[in-house]
Image (cartoon, rainbow, N blue to C red):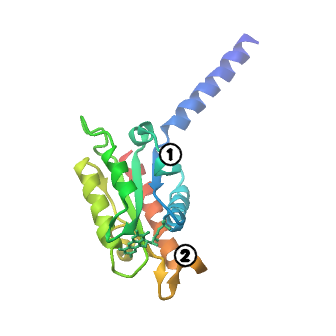
Amino acid sequence: MRNLLLFLSLIFVSQTLFAQEKPLILITYYSQSGNTQQLAEAIAEGAQSVVGVEVKLLPLDQVQTNDLLTASAIVLGSPVYNANIAPPVQEFINSWPFDGRPLRDKIGAVFSTGGGISIGEELVMLNLMHSMLIHGMIVVGGDAVESAFGASAITGEGPFDSKLGMDQIFLEKGMGLGKRVAETVLRFY
Ligand SMILES: Cc1cc2nc3c(=O)[nH]c(=O)nc-3n(C[C@H](O)[C@H](O)[C@H](O)COP(=O)(O)O)c2cc1C
């Protein structure tokens, strides 16, 4: 009986240790009307398709500092507001721990949704990347040249009206980004 208990405890401890060994990918975003959230969900789906990583998907107001510190990768998304990062996303970045640069060497990636074609999503992605670089993060883009800076989606112009649902072309960019981040994390881990 004693040996059985010891055996079961060993299994429990080894499983716990094994579970903790999976690198965590934190995908976080601000979204007022759901578009950026939808792209974030596609990124999470892509990351989850890779075996060996743990994925956490959270709106940024639910992210604790510990989520940032324990993540091996942080994927951050913002809608375009007047060709800029949305203010809550900027505030969120400003709250990241900086002393001793604890986010250094974490993998970073970005995504953005904007209402119109070429009126800000690329600028937002580049700005998000600049902030990650200030923290010493290692920034990666998506898996195709069309998502070289990250995943982005147009949500309000021409055929890309999100009232009809986000276009599949953008969801695929999101999935590709999530998959690439997960594969990169596993290479570095
Ligand atoms: C205050 C405000 C400013 C915006 N400015 C821009 C802009 O400059 N360029 C653009 O492409 N879209 C702009 N948009 C549209 C949003 O970026 C777009 O609808 C986005 O998909 C919203 O994301 P969400 O549904 O996650 O909130 C703006 C929206 C708001 C509310």
Image quadrant of residue 38? bottom right
Whole-percent x, y for residue 176 in the image: 46, 67
Assess disc 2: are there few (<14), some (14-19) or many (≥20) residues with their C-alpha within 10 Å of its C-alpha: some
The quadrant of the rendering that contains the C terminus is top left
Q: Residue at horizontal 52%, vertical 62%?
A: 37
Q: Is residue 16 above or below residue 58?
A: above
- Secondary structure, mark 1, is helix
Whole-percent x, y for residue 10 in the image: 62, 22
Horizontally, is 35 left or right of 81 in the view?
right
Which sits in the foreground, 181 or 169?
169
Whole-percent x, y for residue 26 in the image: 46, 49
In this view, the mark in front (1 or 2)? 1
Q: Does the closest atom of ligand 1 sit within 8 Å of the Cβ of label 2?
A: no
Which residue does the numbered mark 1 point to in the structure image? 62
- Secondary structure, mark 2, is loop
Which sits in the foreground, 27 or 35?
35
Which sits in the foreground, 17 or 42?
42
Which residue does the numbered mark 2 point to in the structure image? 166
